[in-house]
């Protein structure tokens, strides 16, 4: 959610299918157990469960700084089932796509001297990471 965004009932056009908004906010609520930095934003979004509008939905999907257009890298590091570290930081460069932003987040997470197992939920970022052959669409991404 963009910093300083003020939401209220009656903002925007009411959604025809409110169930998608409710499912999304419900999933975000589950993240608060391991991501306390999201608690305030999710609490704000959950106030509109009864009558969500398009403006509320777009607030749930914000992943960039509105002033600089830079994406936010967020990751969690677990040791077994225990969360030992998490971070949210604005990326250094502006990404051309969400796949590139996700790939940059993967690269920032694994700055280690030994191989490590990482998990990502973005299929296109996984394909970019797994395929070491030159691709015309990804040549602008610096590792």
Image (cartoon, grey):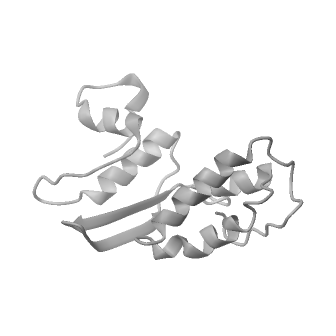
In the image: residue 10, left or right of residue 45:
right
Residue 62 appears in the figure: no
Residue sitting at x 32%, y 32%: 127
Instruction: Residue 141: give x, y in percent of width and height.
Output: 39, 40
Residue 38: give x, y in percent of width and height.
Answer: 53, 70
Where is residue 26 shown, x and y percent of the image? 57, 59
Q: Residue at x 28, y 38 (%)?
A: 129
Q: Nearer the viewer, residue 15 or 116?
A: 15
How many numbered discs, if any?
A: 0
Q: Is residue 65 above or below residue 40?
A: above
The residue shown at (30%, 59%) is 109
Quadrant that contains the N terminus: bottom right
Report the side of 95 relative to 109 (left or right): right
- Residue 16: x %, y % from top left: 80, 41
Tell me where residue 9 sits by quadrant. Answer: bottom right
Q: Is residue 125 left or right of residue 110?
A: right
Query: What residue appears at the point 59 percent right and 52 percent down from the top-left corner?
Result: 24
Of residues 24 and 78, which is closer to you in this image? 24
Please state which of residues 88 and 45 is positioned toward the viewer in this rendering: 45
Please tell me whether residue 93 is drawn above or below residue 36 in the rendered image: above
Above/below status of 25 relative to 104: below
């Amino acid at each position: 959610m963009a910093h300083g965004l003020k939401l209220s009932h009656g903002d925007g056009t009411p959604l025809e299918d409110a169930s998608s908004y409710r499912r999304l906010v419900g999933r975000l609520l589950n993240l608060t157990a391991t991501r306390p930095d999201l608690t305030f934003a999710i609490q704000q979004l959950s106030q509109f469960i009864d009558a969500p509008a398009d403006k509320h939905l777009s607030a749930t999907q914000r992943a960039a700084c509105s002033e600089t257009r830079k994406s936010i890298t967020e990751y969690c590091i677990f040791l077994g089932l225990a969360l030992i570290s998490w971070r949210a930081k604005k990326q250094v460069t502006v990404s051309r796509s969400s796949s590139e932003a996700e790939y940059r987040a993967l690269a920032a997470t694994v700055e280690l001297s030994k191989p490590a197992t990482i998990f990502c939920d973005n299929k296109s970022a996984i394909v970019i990471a797994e395929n070491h052959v030159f691709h015309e669409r990804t040549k602008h991404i610096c590792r």
